[in-house]
Amino acid sequence: MSETLLRVRDLKVHFPVRIGGVFAGRYQMLKAVDGVSFDLKAGETLGIVGESGCGKSTLGRAVLRLLPTTAGHVVWLGADMTELDGAALKARRENMQIVFQDPLASLDPRMTAGNIIAEPLHNYHPELGKAEIAARVSEMMTQVGLQPSMLNRYPHEFSGGQCQRIGIARAMILKPKLIVCDEPVSALDVSIRAQVVNLLMDLQKAFGLSMLFISHDLAVVRHISHRVLVLYLGRMMELSGRESLYRAPRHPYTQALISAVPIPDPDKERAKPKVLLSGDLPSPLTPPSGCVFRTRCRKATEICARVAPAAELIDADHTVWCHHWREESP
Amino acid sequence: MANVLDIRNLNVHFSVRDGDVQAVSDVSLSVAKGECLGIVGESGSGKSQTFMAAMGLLATNGRATGEVNFHGQNVLTLSESARNTLRGNRMTMVFQDPMTSLTPHMRVGAQLTEVLQRHRGLDRTQAHQQAVAMLARVHIPEADRRMAMYPHELSGGLRQRVMIAMALLCGPELLIADEPTTALDVTVQAQILDVIREMKDTLNTAVVLITHDLGVIAGLADHVAVMYAGRIVETGAARDIFMVPKHPYTQSLLACTPRLDEVKRTSLTTIAGQPPNLEHLPTGCAFHPRCPYVMARCRTERPPLIGGKACFLDQLSLAS
């Protein structure tokens, strides 16, 4: 793995939320993503995990500037995306695409599969002739495992797995360097999920693609990612190479997450030690002071309420944001 | 051990615009007291409709034939009012989406006490006390305060706990949980499964756990039935299903599930093709177009369910 394509530095995405009641009419800031930094190299997959509301989708969208950022930098191929707009932004975006979770809802029901896949070409390369576009579309359809003869069918005529393949073909038609996959397999059946995961990995190999793979499914993330970022309430908890994260998770939150994933083996599943989290996710409008995870953390002490933990380097490829990571679990 | 629920040769048909679709074909299952039966299958396998039929909750265009014996009484032939005295009382169901299964404009407390007042004839104070006790039992913090809340004020995990508490209020003999944790995050899923396990062990409730997630089944089920295209293709003790799957579909399903406890950097095993369309089922064994071991016979003849598997293969060689 070579050059760094994407550099995200201290990225913040805050949304103003109108609050009712006594303070009706006032706005409060919801910090969906708060101070996230990472690098992504060519041909690398960074898995982004966390539970609902942790900001993982917001982060993916902010990287593509599909959402306005509040602060921080997204440096893509040397240019800061947060400072670009108009034609310059559009030109930069040719190299970065997105695949969404709901395969059917993310396709225009009134467009044929062929037109959906060709649309990015029309946008970016109006100079291309009809024959050239048709050739590229049919080549891409073959590549994602769709028969080019299905070109004139509409999305509702395809199954969920096939719709996701159309979505992937649309993302890949411009031969991007980066795709953001936002829960791309969560809506699919188990047998189809494996097909789509394999397809993404094959495409990565064939095109040297970089991926941000956003998912709540830790087993799929382990399979597909090189490195993994764990988010909680918009903050980074742990960022690490895959092996080191899954073998020796350091953050109490990562430990709880991993121990909660059921293993399809009755003996192992019933014997394994579980770290059950108590309570619920706090409201993101009023996150806890200091470390945001402290209200559910079994290691929390007084310092956690006062001071937000800084990044601590465990080794070159493993960073954790926790005051107590060195201490053994109680 | 006496079976709480005994389903015999259940068939479920739906009339649709283009004719008739059979969602469940010749399903026989049973579950005993204090036991958990896991039902695994992908979308359209008939896993939910089997138990919607058992509860008498089929959509209006659905018809069920066969027998669903609850303590020896065939539920399918009961009148609606007789069924209502069972449902929510002695046999209960928890659904996937806890938001849409609670009434949005009623306080949690009112929804809980209604069950007790109706089925157990308790007065309001008694019902309130029992409801609070049950909320505490499923580990809802500040149970008393939650009684006055509306469903939208609770998180997804709390709502699902309220659903489970409601299902358990009358001390049912049978709890059917249809994808109870699919809409929830993993850490909350672990909490909810823990509650179900505890209830099964302490109250001796028979539990049917319907899910597509083999991991969830592995943690909780004593027996497992694997469904495909409306039929049971394999059934047996949970350990056997996971350790020595006998049907090629079960084997493939296990192989294509990415696991947290082992890493392959190679590609995942896949099941070729698409899940079947119930309106145009393949002839013979419904799995044959996707089966790696397909034989000539499988295309024309349907294998019966014998010795826990519906497959003509004598032995599934695990090496291949």
Image (spheres, rainbow, N blue to C red):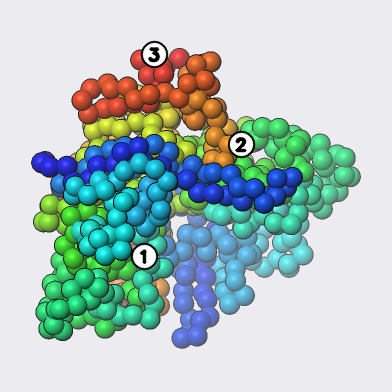
Q: Chain of mark 2?
A: B
Q: Secondary structure at mark 1?
A: loop
Marks 2 and 1, Cα distance to the nearest angstrom? 38 Å
* Residue that mark 3 sits on: A327
Query: Which disc is residue A103 wearing?
Result: 1
Would you say the residues marked 2 and 1 are in contact, meaning their CB atoms lie under 8 Å apart? Answer: no
Q: Amino acid at mark 3?
A: Glu
Q: Amino acid at mark 1?
A: Pro
Q: Residue at x 75, y 37 (%)?
A: B145
* Residue that mark 2 sits on: B199
Is label 2 or label 1 in front? 1
Q: Secondary structure at mark 3?
A: loop
Is the residue marked by circle 1 packed among few (<14), some (14-19), or many (20+) residues within 10 Å? many
Q: Depth check: B244 or B43 in front?
A: B43
Left or right position of A217 against B313: right
> Can you tell which quarter of the image residue A144 is in?
bottom left
Q: Can see residue A291?
A: yes
Query: Compared to B61, does B135 lie above or below?
Result: above
Q: Amino acid at mark 2?
A: Met
**Percent coordinates x, y for residue B34 in the rendering:** 58, 39
Please tell me how many numbered marks the rendered image carries.
3
